[in-house]
Image (cartoon, grey):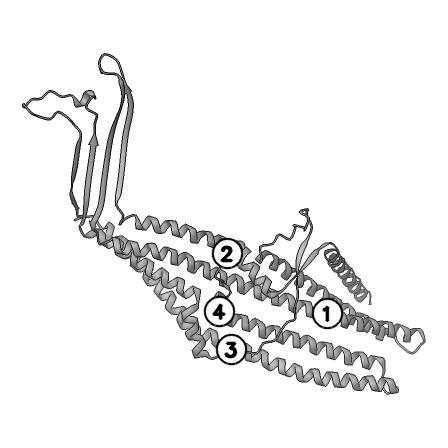
């Protein structure tokens, strides 16, 4: 008996602490309404990870210029300026010596794959951004659905808690008038305590989901409206809607192969590695370039004043040369072939990963389709149970009015109806979560990218 009382006291203490913390959060937090559409829009534009990958797309544009530079003409110039004076170097004054070099590739088999690699650099960054957008939007959608689910369960449990509290009062009144028992009163209190424990857990899950939503949307939960520190959290609004969907595995598999960002990213990696391999192998072939160089030295500079050994010789040292340069690497001790084999192995690894993902698409979609069917079956069963529970509640209510049933019977009928509603909410959430998985498996989250998005 003492052990049971001790457990009851501990449970009451824990529930009191949980309810106090929940009340403090509810009182201090500033909330703002947030719909699912606004949540996805904020995630797309303000999520830190997505914004980081958007910056990486800009970096890729600069890398593309670096790859293109191999095919563009190269011009370099060097100048030496100074001041000359004294008897040894007459006349005194400023001087400048200018040297310039020009080079333009004429025949280089590595130029085409290099240009292709530059274009693929941008594609890689864009597909990485698309994959990040897909993952973060999917996570935001699931967490938002969880928050709506926990919110609905909290409302059901609070209503059920009121019923159990009424049952406790009823048992207490019956005990006071001598028609009840201590056992019945304790049983009613234990039922309410168990429900309060579940309710406290649901409230914790709800606020964890809300905090995760704020992080995904890129909002600062400690920033108030007036600029001062204040707990500010989103409040998910809107119903937990049920939208039926049918899955055509063949059509959805084809759509996924054409639109999934992870598949396109792997294909871009395969193409980029192939371009790198061709660029490396091109070093075995000769390259031909148009070259020119010039050197200008002022005539009044001492170094240009030379004694003419042959009559009519031009003593000036300024010159301009132009021609064609040929280079051909014959022996490199395996440097080129080793790098080529390494890139070939990397390309094969990407191809294997891509092949596995493509093969897994039908199985992944079949699993999602099974989850949808299971959720639909559960929801239909709970809908039928809800009709029976509502009919039973109306019947018990009529019997209570006629004195043929007790208030406890009415409470049991109400609790049964609320339990069925909780199961219906769970089946609806499972269906919508599976529908979100279907959009993720087929790559439909990229439809949220508008023309104004980077």
* Residue receiving disc 4: 444
Mark nearest the camera among 3 and 4 is 4
- Mark 4 packing: few (<14 Cα in 10 Å), some, or many (20+)? some
- Quarter of the picture containing the N terminus is bottom right
Does residue 223 sit above or below 348 in this rendering? above
Q: Is residue 299 left or right of residue 264?
A: left
Q: Which badge, 1 or 2, is on the more N-terminal residue?
A: 2
The nearer-to-camera label among 1 and 4 is 4
Near mark 3 (Cα within 10 A), the count class, few <14, some 14-19 or many ≥20, is many
**Cα–Cα gap, marks 3 and 4:** 16 Å
Pointer 2: what residue? 50
The residue where tag 1 is placed is 155
Q: Secondary structure at mark 1?
A: helix
Badge 4 element: helix
Question: Which residue is label 3 attached to?
Answer: 369
Question: Is residue 288 visible in this depiction of the protein?
Answer: yes
Q: Of the two numbered discs 3 and 4 on the same chain, state the one appearing first in sequence.
A: 3
Q: Residues within 10 Å of mark 2 (few under 14, many from 20)?
A: many
x%, y% of residue 269?
36, 60
Q: CA distance from mark 3 to mark 1?
A: 30 Å
> Which of the two residues, 378 or 12, is positioned nearer the viewer here?
378
């Amino acid at each position: 008996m003492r052990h049971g009382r001790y457990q009851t006291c501990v449970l009451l203490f824990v529930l009191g602490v949980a309810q106090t913390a929940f009340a403090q959060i509810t009182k201090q937090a500033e909330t703002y309404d947030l719909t699912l559409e606004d949540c996805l829009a904020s995630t797309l534009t303000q999520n830190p990870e997505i914004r980081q990958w958007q910056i990486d797309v800009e970096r890729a544009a600069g890398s593309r210029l670096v790859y293109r530079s191999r095919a563009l003409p190269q011009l370099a110039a060097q100048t030496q300026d100074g001041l000359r004076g004294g008897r040894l170097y007459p006349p005194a004054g400023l001087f400048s010596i200018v040297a310039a070099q020009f080079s333009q590739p004429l025949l280089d088999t590595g130029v085409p794959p290099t240009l292709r690699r530059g274009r693929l650099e941008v594609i890689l960054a864009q597909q990485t951004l698309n994959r990040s957008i897909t993952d973060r939007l999917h996570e935001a959608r699931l967490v938002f659905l969880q928050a709506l689910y926990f919110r609905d369960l909290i409302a059901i449990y609070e209503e059920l808690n009121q019923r159990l509290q009424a049952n406790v009062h009823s048992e207490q009144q019956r005990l006071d008038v001598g028609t009840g028992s201590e056992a019945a009163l304790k049983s009613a209190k234990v039922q309410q305590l168990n429900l309060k424990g579940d309710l406290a857990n649901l409230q914790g899950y709800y606020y964890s989901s809300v905090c995760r939503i704020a992080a995904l949307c890129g909002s600062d939960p400690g920033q108030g409206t007036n600029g001062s520190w204040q707990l500010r959290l989103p409040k998910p609004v809107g119903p937990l809607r049920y939208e039926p969907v049918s899955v055509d595995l063949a059509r959805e598999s084809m759509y996924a192969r054409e639109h999934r960002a992870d598949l396109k990213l792997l294909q871009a990696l395969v193409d980029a590695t192939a371009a790198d391999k061709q660029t490396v192998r091109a070093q075995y072939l000769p390259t031909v370039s148009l070259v020119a160089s010039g050197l200008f030295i002022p005539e009044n500079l001492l170094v240009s004043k030379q004694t003419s050994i042959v009559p009519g010789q031009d003593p000036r040292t300024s010159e301009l040369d132009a021609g064609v340069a040929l280079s051909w690497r014959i022996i490199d001790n395996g440097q080129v072939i080793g790098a080529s084999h390494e890139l070939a192995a990397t390309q094969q690894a990407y191809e294997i990963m891509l092949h596995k993902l493509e093969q897994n698409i039908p199985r992944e979609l079949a699993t999602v389709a099974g989850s949808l069917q299971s959720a639909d079956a559960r929801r239909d069963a709970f809908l039928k149970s809800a009709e029976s529970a509502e009919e039973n509640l109306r019947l018990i209510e009529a019997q209570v009015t006629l004195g043929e049933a007790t208030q406890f019977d009415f409470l049991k009928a109400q609790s049964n109806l609320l339990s069925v509603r909780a199961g219906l909410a769970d089946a609806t959430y499972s269906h919508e979560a599976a529908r979100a998985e279907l959009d993720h498996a087929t790559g439909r989250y990229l439809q949220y990218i508008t023309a104004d998005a980077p």
